[in-house]
Image: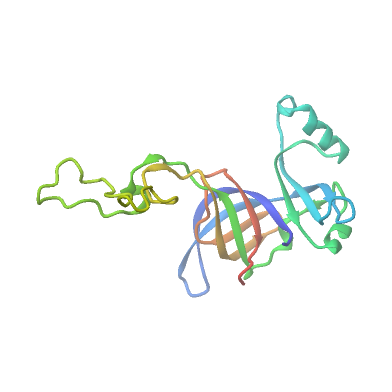
Amino acid sequence: MGLGLLGKKLGMTQIFDDHGNAVPVTVIKTGPCKVIQKKTSLKEGYDALQLGFEEVQKIGRVNKPMTGHFKKASAAPVKFLKEFRVTPEDVNEREIGSEITVDIFEPGEFVDVTGTSKGKGFAGVIRRHGFKGQPASRGTHEFFRHGGAIGQNMTPGRTFKGTKMPGHMGNRRVTVQSLKIVDVRGDTNILLVEGAIPGPTNGYVIVKKAVKK
C-alpha cells in the first residue's frame, strides 16, 4: 500500500559520485500523473487513487467506455492507467484532475520498480533456466542441450507442475526491489535510480516506495 507514480524508461547512463566512482543509473520519465478516479472504502470497499500517464495522441483509438471514464474526470485520455491502494487521508488530499509529480520522491530513498521484461521468444532450458546441458562426450548424441529427465516412473506417474522446461522466455511482469534514488529532477520530471529496471527503452513502469526499506 502506498502512493506511487507511473513512468517511462528512457534508458541507462552513468554519473559520478562524490568519490569519483562511476554509478550506473536508469533514467525514468516519472509523471506528472493525473488523478483520474478516487475510490473510497464507503463506496467501493477500499481506498485507492487511479492515476493516468501520457496523453493519447489519437483520440479515435480510445473506445467509448474509456472516453466516458476520462470525460467524467475532465481529463484527456491517457495511455497508461494504474490504481494505487492508499490511506483515506491520501484520498482526501488529492482531487480528481490534480497532478502528482516526481517531487514525492527524494534522493537517497529506495523504490520498487515494476515493468514488463523484454520478450525473448521460445528458449531452451540452457538459456531459460541456466541448465548445464549433457556431457559433450561419452556417447552423447544429439542431446547436448536437452534438459534430461522430467519425471518419475509409476509413482507419481506424472510430471510435477513448475518443472523447469523449454518455453516462452521474458515478456513477464517483473518487480526489482530496493533501488536507490540517485537524483530527482523536478523541472523535467526525471528520476535517476541506481541499477537496472525491467523492460525496453520507452517501456512503461510503476515506481513505488520500497516495502523492504
- Image-quadrant location for residue 122: top left
Is residue 162 left or right of 92 when viewed as pictured? left
Is residue 179 left or right of 86 when viewed as pictured? left
Asked if residue 78 is positioned above or below residue 27 in the image, the reply reads above
Task: Give me the residue at 52% from left, 59% from top.
Answer: 25
- Image-quadrant location for residue 141: top left
Task: Give me the residue at 40% from left, 41% from top.
Answer: 167
For the N terminus, the image quarter is bottom right
Q: Position of residue 183 (x, y in %)?
A: 62, 63
Is residue 138 left or right of 46 when viewed as pictured? left
Q: Residue furthest bottom?
A: 19
Asked if residue 192 is positioned above or below residue 168 in the image, the reply reads below
The foreground one among 61 and 100 is 61
Task: Give me the residue at 83% from left, 61% from top.
Answer: 90
Q: Is the image coloured rainbow, by chain, by secondary structure, or in one colour?
A: rainbow
Residue 188 seen anywhere in this rendered image of the structure: no
Q: Position of residue 91 (x, y in %)?
A: 85, 57
The foreground one among 69 and 30 is 69
Q: Position of residue 53 (x, y in %)?
A: 71, 44
Asked if residue 19 is positioned above or below residue 43 in the image, the reply reads below
Task: Give me the residue at 46% from left, 41% from top.
Answer: 119
Q: Position of residue 175 (x, y in %)?
A: 56, 56
